[in-house]
Amino acid sequence: MVYSLAASTLTLAAPVGCDTSSAEGVEPTAAQAHGPSRVLVTGADEEMLVLEVTAANKVVVRLPRVEVGQGITTAVAMMIAEELDARLVDVDIPLAEARTKGNQYTGGSSSVRSLYGPARALAATARARLVTAAARRWHLPARSLRTRDTMVVAPDGRTATFGSLTAAAAGIRRPDVSSKPKPASEHKVIGRPTGRIDARDIVTGKAKYTGDLEVAGAKPTVVARPPTLGGRLVSVDDRAARAMPGVHAVVKVAGGVAVVAESFHHAFKARDALRITWRPGPLASLSDAAIRSRLRAAVPSVGAPPRGSAQVEGEFEFAFVSHAPMEVLTAVADVRADRAEIWFSSQTPMDARESIASAIGLPKSKVRVHVVRGGGSFGRRLNYDAAIEAALISKAARRPVKLMWSRGDDIRHGRMRGASHHRIRASHERGRVVAFSHAMASVSESYERQGVTAQGGVSTVAAGPLPSDSGLYNFGRVSGSSGSVELAMPLGAWRSVDSGTMRTAEEIVVDEVAAELGKDPVAFRRGTLRNKAVKAVLDKVAAAGHWGRRLPSGQAQGVAVHEEYGSCVACLVEIDATDPKNPRVTKVVMAADVGTAVNPRGLEAQLMGTAVDGISTVLRAGLHIDRGAVREGSFADFRYARQQHSPLHFEAHIMPSRREPGGAGELGVPAAAGAVANAYARATRTKPRRFPINF
């Protein structure tokens, strides 16, 4: 169900589950912002979508998600345009600020899945009311009217824009035509490859990111941070910094010493002039070798294999990895004695609002969080470190600030994917796998949740099912267990989270089992995969990528599959590893079944991005820990794939489907990573076990 707001233009909201005396949780719409307070009629839908048709014939939907380059604003605009029969250029998708109720979580490849039904229902209801308004104006049967190009059209050719009907439509409670969304067979926008609605703004600089915002009085701010993770400030001599031109304030914060200045140039100069004594962090005695050793020791036993079976076994190590979004972390904060206002890009704005309020000692009702588009995330903006820090600096400096973490700040002190160690054993007998065991241990961030001081870390083992396992295949008895090593490190969810390492390791073992049994890797997978949809995407990449074609010495193909989020994907890779230290992926072919692909062009872009992630983390990009410090500090040494490392040929095949959408944003990472690893192994005739390979 959807409901209308008491407004002078048509404004519809999905039910939000609050009482009728308050519109708590939803910021004012464009119509409300310039008029008296309105009452929201309520229900119980977590998405809290609000759709407004303005007098200027614009359809505005305030999106309770954040746009970080994944194209969610375009996908939702397409859903709205489809059901309204509106022109896509007439649909605006601003980002909703932090609310007090509902779902504003952007993650888990869930946005399109969770919004597909509510967005279409909202737009379909709006269309029914607009058609009814036109019918009553023209004294015609509502069923005789049709809609197109953001207007209602009568049988005699008369037209009325949605904007001209919005005031009348706002008062209609029971429309004269159906308000059900269209069947998939009638879709003209959904499923059509579409360019991003914000593409021109992005490439021309019109799109605004946090660093572009002009908030009154907000001054550029940077922080001097310790050389080791978790290092503490002992003393600071800031006299030279305070005397420098353009410096407004120098304040101590939990993470170091902040400098507020007239420009970022002044701020960085003053930061470098600070004379600081630091206490080393709790991991100062630890480096990579010791962490790998602890992880290996924390992996649970895989148990005894079935009697009479032969074994294919492997142990795999994955390094820490930075998110490194192209736009560095930035937050603007204006904290006053009785209120606060924060601007930043957040995947979890409701949680952020609550945490910021707690940190600065204000009720959350006095904290307003504006959600700003982000230049990349990959999970990094699930956390809001920079926003809390900006708020604390603003409070201490008693002025608005625009805080920017440098690239080095984020790589050396920001969140990262935890390192992990995997032990896998496939037991086979009479040409088939009869048991498959996967045990792993990863660095845990539980110290943050439990207040663990972690003087170097403590290993713990917790037996239990893994987040992802080889249930993808008919491998007989499948088992998994996990352990952890608790270290005082800032960890966070990295794109594809657990599956990015687990499926990679498993797909390598699948290839090695096929070799042990003398079978072709694609044929072996086809004979053991449980899901027909997974077989279909595997068949697609094998055919489109010409699996099995002859390649020169030092070059090879690799393949891998993955199933998650109600979707599945296959990836075929060709690699030139003639120089094993400088391998080049030359070709990537991917096929995905995600149910209804709202925007196939956007999905293709997502798959391309996951291919680059797989290339990067398998071949070259990781973080070293040196005596409690992250060694890397920029893209110069955190070696993510650049243009010269990208495949010369990329193609994506979207499988046709009319079922509800599945998830897609993270789907391709495990398959891409597994395919790259398998291609490298076949090209070099080695068994890679530590990733990235050239690290």
Image (tube, grey):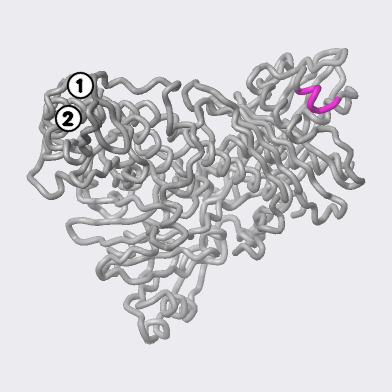
Q: Is residue 106 above or below residue 570?
A: below
Tag 2 or tag 1, which sits nearer the N-term? 2
Residue drawn 68% across and 41% down? Answer: 295
Q: Quadrant of residue 449?
A: top left
Nearer to the camera, 424 or 289:
424
Q: Residue lying at the far left in this picture: please name it.
A: 36
Residue 485 in the image, given as x and y percentages of width and height: 61, 41
Residue drawn 52% across and 55% down? Answer: 325
Residue 179 in the image, given as x and y percentages of width and height: 27, 21
Q: Find out whether the residues at labels 1 and 2 contact each other: C-beta distance under 8 Å.
A: yes
The amino acid pointed to by label 1 is Ala
Q: Is residue 517 left or right of residue 109?
A: right
Give the residue at mark 1.
Answer: 142
Q: Is residue 644 left or right of residue 373?
A: right
The amino acid pointed to by label 2 is Ala
Q: Residue lying at the far front in this picture: please name it.
A: 156
Give the residue at mark 2.
Answer: 134
Residue drawn 82% across and 55% down? Answer: 581
Quarter of the image with the C terminus in it: bottom right
Q: Is residue 70 left or right of residue 124?
A: right
User: What is the magenta range?
Assistant: 520-525
Residue drawn 41% across and 47% down? Answer: 197
Q: Residues within 10 Å of mark 1 (few under 14, many from 20)?
A: many
Q: SS for tag 2?
A: helix
Residue 330 in the image, given as x and y percentages of width and height: 41, 60
Asked if one can make out residue 25 in the rendered structure from this viewpoint, the answer is no
Please tell me the numbered disc located at residue 70: none
Quarter of the image with the N terminus in it: top left
